[in-house]
Each structure stands twice: as C-alpha cells, then as structure tokens.
Amino acid sequence: MSKTSLINLQNLTGERIGRLFSIADDLADTKAAPSSKSFNKGLTAALIFLEPSTRTRMSFEIACLREGVGPVVFDSATGTSLEKGETFEDTMLNIAAMKPSLIVVRSNDTLDMAAVDAQVEAPIINAGWGRQGHPTQALLDAYTLKSRTGRLQGERLLIIGDVRHSRVASSHLELAPLLGYEIGFCGPRAFMPEAPTVKVFDRLQDGLDWATGVMSLRVQLERHDSQIDLADYHALWGINKNNLKSIRPDAYLMHPGPINWGVEMSADVMKDSRNVILKQVESGARIRQALVRVTLDPKGNS
Ligand code: CP
C-alpha cells in the first residue's frame, strides 16, 4: 500500500481534507479524545524538530499520545551526531531506518524533505519547512475558519505582513483553490512576493475593506538583513484599536503564532470577540490528531 506523506498540499484532494475535517469535528467534544487503540502496539512517531516550535511540536506530541502512538522527540543537535558534522538528511535516513511508524519533521530550507520522503518507508508529515510550506498550519487555519463561518467557499482571507518569508502563506496559496476561499496579501512592498499570484493591497484599510477575515503574520526578524522600525510597522500594518472598528463585525482575526505583540497586533485584539487565535491552536491539536490517524490508517480499518 502506498504511504500518505504530507510534504505539501498540492496532491491533497477535497475528499481527503473533508475526511480530516470530519474526524476533527468528531474529536471536538472530548477533552482527551483517546483512540480505541491501546498505547502499547508498538506504533511510534519520530518527531524531528530542528527549528523552534511550541504549538506544532506540542500538538503533534499530544495528537500521537491520544492516538496511542509513542512520540520520540529529536529536537536538538546537542548530544547528537549532528555535532560531529552528520548532515540532517543522513540523520533522517538513520532515524527512518529504525522503522518509526511516522516521521514528523520541522526543518529549514536546506533539507530536501521531498527527496528524503522518496527514500524512506515511513510517511513524513511536514511540520514547517523553511519558507516552503507549513501545510498543517494552513489546514488548521481553514478548519478554524470553517468552524467559525460554516463555509469556506467565497471567504476572503487577508494575509498581512511578511508574506515573502512565510511558509504559512505558501501553504495557503496551495490550499485556497482546493477549498474555494480567496487570498489577498497586504504589507510593505519588501515583504510581498516578487511575482504575486493573488491580490496585493498597498494600504491596510483597502485590504480590510475587502476581507471577510484577517490573518497577521509574524515579522520574522531573524530572516531580515535590514533593520525594521517596529513602531512604524505597527502604525502602518498593525491591527489595533484604530482599525478594529473598521473590520466587519462577522470577521475573524487570526495569527499563526508566535505573536510579536505591539508589532503585528496590539493587545486590543486579545479582547476582541472576533479573535480566534487560541481557537486556531485548539484546531491544531484536533487536525493533527486526525492527520496522525489517517496517515497511519488511510483506509480507516481500525
Ligand atoms: N504556528 C506555528 O507553527 O507555531 P510554532 O512555531 O510554535 O509551532
């Protein structure tokens, strides 16, 4: 049987996404939502996180435990053969040779995740790959959006900020056409893609007028060569009490996290009823649990 890795969203079908969302719905009303599988069947997931993560890593660990899959975490070069110069690719091939049931990996752009996937037996889930993509984040955003609005078709999601460096924006560009929502970008020119394939708004207010929902992105200071004036950035592109008034009352306010408060958003957002930022995190645990389940049991036999 062929494995069902998730490296990007290009080959995902509406049917597979619908199944994920439906399992996530079923998990909604239970706190722990334990699987019927016992924990001791020898299923293991190698969680390889060589870039920082809180939400993605913890939610995959929780998802695995709830599915009866033992998570084994590799999250630092310290004390490993990476310190002796072993490459990340060799590290992954060696971990894969130990036959985990599943590999979840966060890496920078230097790893060719697709090439590793082609060489190993275990399915690989991309948990954030450099600037290339963060498919589970886009899925959990879309799931949150659908839970909030009841539909995705016709929704207009304004992504504000550092689109050029954003793996989240890359994954939304793949997911939006599959699910029927529209994407718009807004932010400083230097943060916009060189050849955008979606609407780009030069003024925040124009984007806010167009959007049915808003997602601010973290300014990735670590990926910029030049200094950014964060107060100027907030004045032009931040969501705050001045522009919250002009966002439609039925909109939703999202951020994938982590947030630079006072830069992408002011603390006023936290108190706003349209804020679904922690709902995104809740959705993330459910979507990732659903993904672990269907990845290990694509036909739903157990
Ligand atoms: N959104 C997201 O990927 O958060 P973490 O970096 O904390 O996993």
Image (cartoon, rainbow, N blue to C red):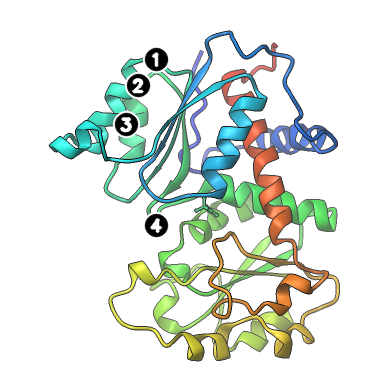
User: Which of pointers 3 and 2 lies earlier in the amino acid sequence?
Assistant: 2
Label 3, label 4: how far apart the Cα atoms are: 18 Å
> Residue 129's x, y, as percent?
40, 48
Q: Which residue is mark 4?
A: 131
Residue in view at x 58 percent, y 74 percent: 261
Label 2, residues with CA under 10 Å away: few <14, some 14-19, many ≥20: many
3 and 2 marks in contact (CB < 8 Å): yes
Q: Which residue is mark 2?
A: 96
**Image height of 118 relative to 265, above or below:** above
> Ligand 1 near label 1 (Cβ, under 8 Å)?
no
Residue positioned most to the top: 41
The image quarter in which residue 246 lies: bottom right
* Kind of residue at disc 3: Val
**Disc 3 and disc 1: Cα gap in Å?**
14 Å
The CA distance from mark 1 to mark 2 is 5 Å
Cα separation between marks 2 and 4: 24 Å
Crowd rating for badge 1 (residues with CA inside 10 Å; few <14, some 14–19, many 20+): some
On screen, residue 121 above or below 4: above
Above or below — where is 246 with respect to 56?
Answer: below
- Asked if residue 165 lies left or right of residue 213, the reply is left
Q: Cβ–Cβ below 8 Å for labels 1 and 2?
A: yes
Residue type, mark 2 in image? Ala
